[in-house]
Amino acid sequence: MKVRAIQYVVLIGVAAVFLGPLYWLLSTAFKQPTQIYQWPPAWWPDLTWENFGLAWKAAPFDRFFLNSTVITVAGTLLKVANAVLTAYAFAYLRFPFKKVLFFLVLGAMMVPGHVTLLPNYLTVATLGWINTYAGLIIPGIGSAFATFLMRQHFLTLPSEVTDAAAVDGAGHLRTLWRVVLPMSRPMLITVVVITAVEEWNNFVWPLIVTNTASMRTLPVGLLILKDEEGLANWGTIMAGALLVLAPMLLIFLIAQRYIVGGITQGALKG
């Protein structure tokens, strides 16, 4: 019983470390300005929606939401489609230098994203895509991590099923759509959620490839909001941060039962 009690105490402590900042953000977003700076802190604030109205007026959050939604939806669809097709090729097709190319994909996972910022920016500028949706979306549609996850999962699927589809005359695209993807739903949902969160939270690339407020995304909008409000009105800033956080948090909570099982599928097969 003592060991069990210690385990519970440790788990509660770890949960407090992770959930404490989230609760502080949530409570501050609903606090009156006088409650934010009082000591001792007000753990149960008098709820007010004023901070959200001020945040919405201080920066064009309606446009930020539209841009982030377009970029997240389009970027996620293109990135996941690219990853699925590439992973299927690595898992089921035979072609020269297959292993070498896959090792190059693995190597791309080890390259920091900031290394490619300058080449991507120069390419986008040459194509005339600065401050456009194409410039925001196209350079990021390749994902080595998503390709790796999908390929590892495809290798765990029973080969008898795909062989039977080939015997029935199904081509590769039909086999992928009718056989492989239905058996890969948990992994596919996992990759979609991870990719969507990555697209939604992307900050550096939208910051450097856009130059007008009408093309900014929500993470960049938070920077604009901070510049507008300064470091005094934390209630408004936290309300804006909650507006950015809420959609992805909701999606994660809905899909969380697929994520753990999806990530671990295929982890031991190479």
Image (cartoon, rainbow, N blue to C red):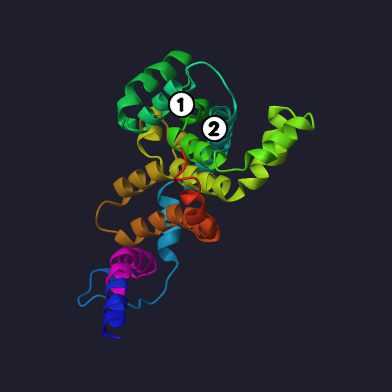
Amino acid found under the numbered disc labelled 2: Ala
Rendered image: mark on residue 139: 1
The N terminus is located in which quarter?
Answer: bottom left
User: Percent position (x, y) of residue 101?
Assistant: 45, 22
**Which residue of the protein is positioned furthest toward the front in this rendering?**
160
Q: Is residue 116 visible?
A: yes
- Asked if 61 appears above or below 103 in the picture, the reply is below
Image quadrant of residue 19? bottom left
Q: Exactly how many numbered labels are in the figure?
A: 2
Rendered image: mark on residue 163: none
Q: Is residue 186 magenta?
A: no
Q: Is residue 247 visible?
A: no
Q: Nearer the viewer, residue 97 or 241?
A: 97
The stretch in magenta equals 12-34
**Which residue of the protein is positioned furthest toward the right in this rendering?**
168
User: Percent position (x, y) of residue 33?
Assistant: 31, 68
Label 2 CA crowd tier, 10 Å (few <14, some 14–19, many 20+): many
| Disc on the earlier residue, 1 or 2 | 2
Secondary structure mostly seen in magenta is helix
In the image, what residue occupies the spot 36% across and 28% down? 107
The residue under label 2 is 87
